[in-house]
Image (spheres, rainbow, N blue to C red):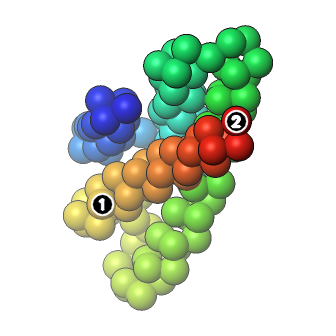
Amino acid sequence: MRLIILIAVTTILLLELSDALPKSSVGGPMAMMMIVFLAVLALGLYEAWSQKRGVLGWLVSIVASVIGGFFGAAVASAILGTLLSHFSLGVPLAESQHPLRYIASAGMMLLALLGSWIALQIVNRSR
């Protein structure tokens, strides 16, 4: 699980550093959410595989991971939006080279994966 988190955060940071993510108001966030979706999906698949779940267990783990990951991403978005409102950069964060851009991207990924992990822990406790 640590390897999945490390790969996900490294991927998002490398894409941000290389300016590979689009800077448009639709393309950039959609690409970032696709990366978050793939990371939480990998987390759900890994949890189901490592716990040797049956078919229903795999489905429940994947669904719980995705729902928890998107809930975590929504919470991260609200937190980062509130924090960013206190900074007056003058330009949108996606167009700047401010270090906060990279911190926000990594934080978003970490909080999304934390939401996924919490959802998986809730499901595991209810089994």
3 left or right of 120 in image = left
- Checking the image for residue 1, the label placed there is none
| Residue in view at x 63 percent, y 44 percent | 125
Kind of residue at disc 1: Ile
Residue 98 image point, x, y percent: 25, 66
Q: Quadrant of the N terminus?
A: top left
Question: Is the residue marked by circle 1 packed among few (<14), some (14-19), or many (20+) residues within 10 Å?
Answer: few
| Residue in view at x 37 percent, y 84 percent | 87
Q: Is residue 20 above or below residue 13?
A: above
Q: Is residue 98 above or below residue 27?
A: below
Residue 93 or residue 127, whichever sits in front = 127
Where on the picture, by quarter, is residue 124? Answer: top right
Residue 25 image point, x, y percent: 58, 53
Q: Secondary structure at mark 1?
A: helix
Q: Secondary structure at mark 2?
A: loop
**Residue 46 visible in the picture:** yes
Q: Quadrant of the C terminus?
A: top right
**Residue 30 visible in the picture:** no
Residue 20 image point, x, y percent: 36, 35
7 left or right of 73 in image = left
Cα distance in 3D space between marks 1 and 2: 36 Å
| Residue in view at x 57 percent, y 21 percent | 48
Residue 18 image point, x, y percent: 25, 38
N-terminal label among 1 and 2? 1
Report which residue position mark 2 lands on. 127
Report which residue position mark 1 lands on. 103
Question: Is the residue marked by circle 2 packed among few (<14), some (14-19), or many (20+) residues within 10 Å?
Answer: few
Q: Is residue 23 above or below residue 40?
A: below
Check if mark 1's residue and mark 2's residue have beta carbons within 8 Å: no
Kind of residue at disc 2: Arg
Camera-near label (1 vs 2) is: 2
6 left or right of 125 in image = left
